[in-house]
Amino acid sequence: MRRALTVPMLGMLVSILAAGNALSAQGEIKLPRPALQGKMSVEQAITGRKSSRDFKAAPLSLGEVGQLLWAANGMIPADAVTGATRKVMPSAGGLYPLEVFILTGNNTVENVPAGVYQYNPNAHSLKEVATGDKRTLLAHAALGQMWLARAPAVVVIGAVFARTTAKYGNRGVNYVFMEAGNSDQNLCLQAEALGLRTGTVGAFNDAQVAGAIQMPGDTAPLLVIGVGK
Ligand SMILES: Cc1cc2nc3c(=O)[nH]c(=O)nc-3n(C[C@H](O)[C@H](O)[C@H](O)COP(=O)(O)O)c2cc1C
């Protein structure tokens, strides 16, 4: 007997197909709650941090990726009663121009399909921007720094300049660059504290990076960071 596929059956099919990755039907991946305490002192993290351009093939866990993105652009619970939050770093005028993206390959981040994702700080989740492994495209956009294509995850710190320049004019441009540095350093120190390696890259063609990761039109790429073990 032939039976039509009902909505619940379709839902079940989607769940079965999605098993093994954390991507919801809406293209969202919920990240594990970030730890607010770690095993390494900030002094040890500062002392240990150095650039790496060589990574093991070992995948990163979803928890590691969540912790890194939280450090780069996340929210801190500020008031348990009201549920108020604040950001992990200072921002001129509290305008928070940064947007952070992550590129993954096939099985390079556990439970995350190869693709490009935008970090949502409020939901502490990833939103799918593009599917497929874009790391090689990005490495070419970074003037052929092919080691980036071998990093299990590549983070791109971008910014919507207008959020800050609407208030501060041209001076706001400086502020946005400074804030990208804050974000990069937070990420690098967090990686160090997790026993991960990072390599920060500023040499790239802006338009090619934006194209490679299908960055929203109002956002400009500022820094690229290869991450791995
Ligand atoms: C804004 C900026 C841009 C950088 N661009 C690149 C880059 O394109 N390629 C690269 O291999 N390293 C790049 N680096 C990393 C530096 O080469 C590195 O930080 C420097 O040599 C000091 O080494 P350390 O990070 O191990 O302390 C960049 C660093 C910064 C802060």
Image: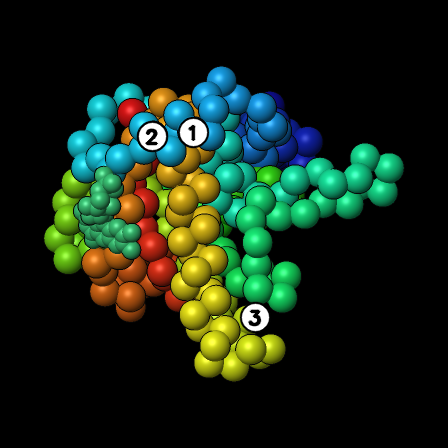
Q: Amino acid at mark 1?
A: Glu
Q: Is residue 223 left or right of residue 203?
A: right
Q: Which quadrant, please, contains the C terminus? A: top left
| Mark found first going from the N terminus, 3 or 2 | 2
Q: Which residue is mark 3?
A: 163
Q: Is residue 19 left or right of residue 114?
A: right
Q: Amino acid at mark 3?
A: Arg
Q: Which residue is mark 1?
A: 43
Label annotation for residue 172? none
Q: SS of the residue at dot 1? A: helix
Q: Is residue 158 left or right of residue 30?
A: left
Task: Tell me which residue sits at (43%, 56%) in the image.
Answer: 180
- The residue closer to the viewer here, 123 or 45, is 45
- The residue closer to the viewer here, 15 or 39, is 39
Q: Which residue is mark 2?
A: 47
x and y percentages locating residue 137 in the rendered image: 22, 52
Whether residue 158 is situated above or below residue 161 in the rendered picture:
above
For label 3, the crowd category at 10 Å Cα-Cα, with few meaning under 14, some 14 to 19 and many 20 or more, is: some
